[in-house]
Image (tube, rainbow, N blue to C red):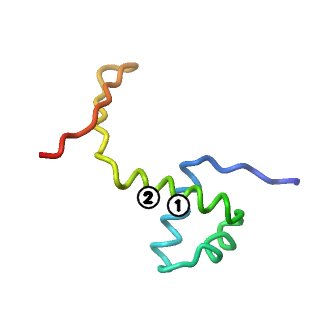
Amino acid sequence: MKGFQRRTVLELVAQIFQLLKEDSPQTLGSLCKELNIVWKQADSYINLITYIQKQPKIKDQKLGARTRILSLEKND
């Protein structure tokens, strides 16, 4: 496969959101066709996105150049 470059998880998730912003709603099949991915892969990414959206937000604090403190935001 000459010229083929694997997409990172972030790139593919960004492409899913971009496609849905431009043309929503989409079937999973049309999403697969547009992004050139198989149904199982698309289903896994949608399940991951849905799971993350249901979770509390992550609080990410940078302390200096190499230190990051991660915690979950509290829902009051």
Mark linked to residue 23: none
Coordinates of residue 11 in the picture (x, y in percent): 57, 52
Task: Quickly name the residue at label 1.
Answer: 46
Residue that numbered label 2 is attached to = 50
What percent of the width, then of the height, locates residue 73?
23, 40
Front in this rendered view, residue 19 or 31: 31
Q: Quadrant of residue 33?
A: bottom right
User: Residue at position x 54%, y 49% from top?
Assistant: 10
Type of amino acid at the residue the image marks with label 2 = Thr
CA gap between label 2 and label 1 equals 6 Å
Q: With 42 as the anchor, is 68 left or right in this view?
A: left
Looking at the image, residue 1 sits to the left or right of residue 75; the answer is right
Q: Write the residue at 43% across / 53% down.
A: 51
Q: Residues within 10 Å of mark 2 (few under 14, many from 20)?
A: few
Identify the residue at horizontal 74%, vertical 50% (top origin). Answer: 5
Q: Nearer the viewer, residue 53 or 34?
A: 53
For mark 1, give the secondary structure.
helix
The answer to whether marks 2 and 1 mark residues whose Cβ atoms lie closer than 8 Å is yes
